[in-house]
Amino acid sequence: MAVIAAIAVAQLAANLGYDSAAARYEDAATTTNGTKSQTEREAADLRVTTQAASQILSAQTRAIPVDPELEATLSEAVADAETAATRADAASAGDVPTMGDKPIWFWELFGATELWERRLTQVEKLDDDLRAAITDMTSADERVTQGGLSLVSAAGEAAPDFEEAHRSARNEAVIALRSAASDAVETTVLDDTAASAYLALQTAAAQVVSTEAEEMAEKSGPLKTQRLEIEAFARSLAPGVLLEFDWSPVVNGAGYDGSMGGYTTWWWDDPGRATIELSDSVAEQWPAERSRALVAHEVGHAISVKCEGMYDSSTQDSIEKWATAWAISMGFTDDANGVWAYGYPPQNYIDAAAGCR
């Protein structure tokens, strides 16, 4: 009976010890599995961030210059993030053993209890390693995100000065640049969308440079200096309106024998824009008052995009009277302001045009 009692006590103690060890292990295993899943998610998210940053860093087109310090900071952050993700992969590769059937006899229970105690220590260490990996990845993600967004935002914020430095670019390219810059500045998450916004901005900037080069080639020749002066003069009269210029020997039926021709097409869209066509004779006679007056008339058409509803735009006569009135309101009194071709405009048009700036 003493032996039986001893066996019973041993069996009871073995069961209690096993159950305690098993419960503690199950709790630790559940926690570690949760941490492992979180680690895998964090690693996947970090790779999305680093992939976006890598696309930004490897952009083939960089028409808008990138600050070398911002680029170096982002490059270093990406390298650290990739290392952190690799370490996280190694940590999360560790197994979390599952418990099998509970043994029956006390000598089996004692052995199994010792095994689960050892595994408990291993699983707790794995959980610590995984949490450390998460901390490293969180820090790395913050650095990459901050560096990437800073670079994208800086490029977007540089767009206005870039546009100003390429005034002869075509309107379509400038509008695309503005749209892309807006997307870049408004970016708040570093992902594929952010990378696409940056690449689109650099592509648009390259188009600005390309179209400006094409326009400058078209303006080349002995009248290039005068043409550029006239374009700058026109832009000074209509701030905020995108102006594009085309030059030809004859425009609107005029250009030879001392005559000058001009023709303007404008769009009411946002942003307001216009294309002004001028005959070469306008540049040949520049900076004579009659040349300046004719340009002012054409700008009067272009600037109407800022003053829609201020005049009757339903008839050609009214449209021309408006442009003439606007030129007069700006102080250009030579008859080339439109008076010679279209007659003197009503005073109420001149008064209204004075409010269109």
Image: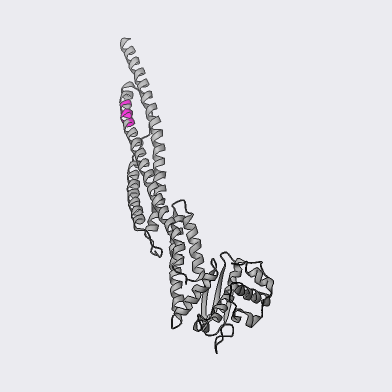
Give the x, y percent position of residue 295. 55, 77
Residue 257, compared with residue 194, is above or below; it is below
Residue depicted at x 33% and y 17%: 10
Give the x, y percent position of residue 277. 55, 78
For this rendering, which residue is in front, 43 or 219?
219
Secondary structure mainly formed by the magenta segment: helix
For this rendering, which residue is in front, 322 or 175?
322
Q: Is residue 298 part of the magenta span, yes or no?
A: no
Q: Quadrant of residue 238?
A: bottom right
Give the x, y percent position of residue 242. 53, 69
Residue depicted at x 58% and y 78%: 263
Give the x, y percent position of residue 20. 37, 23
Q: Is residue 332 left or right of residue 148?
A: right
The N terminus: image quadrant = top left
* Total numbered labels placed on residues in the image: 0
Residue 134, compared with residue 345, is above or below; it is above
Residue 137, compared with residue 269, is above or below; it is above
Residue depicted at x 63% and y 83%: 340
The C terminus: image quadrant = bottom right
Q: Quadrant of residue 212?
A: bottom left
For this rendering, which residue is in front, 32 or 342?
342
The colour scheme used to paint the residues is one colour
Magenta segment, which residues? 113-120
- Look at the image and tell me whether residue 314 can be seen: no
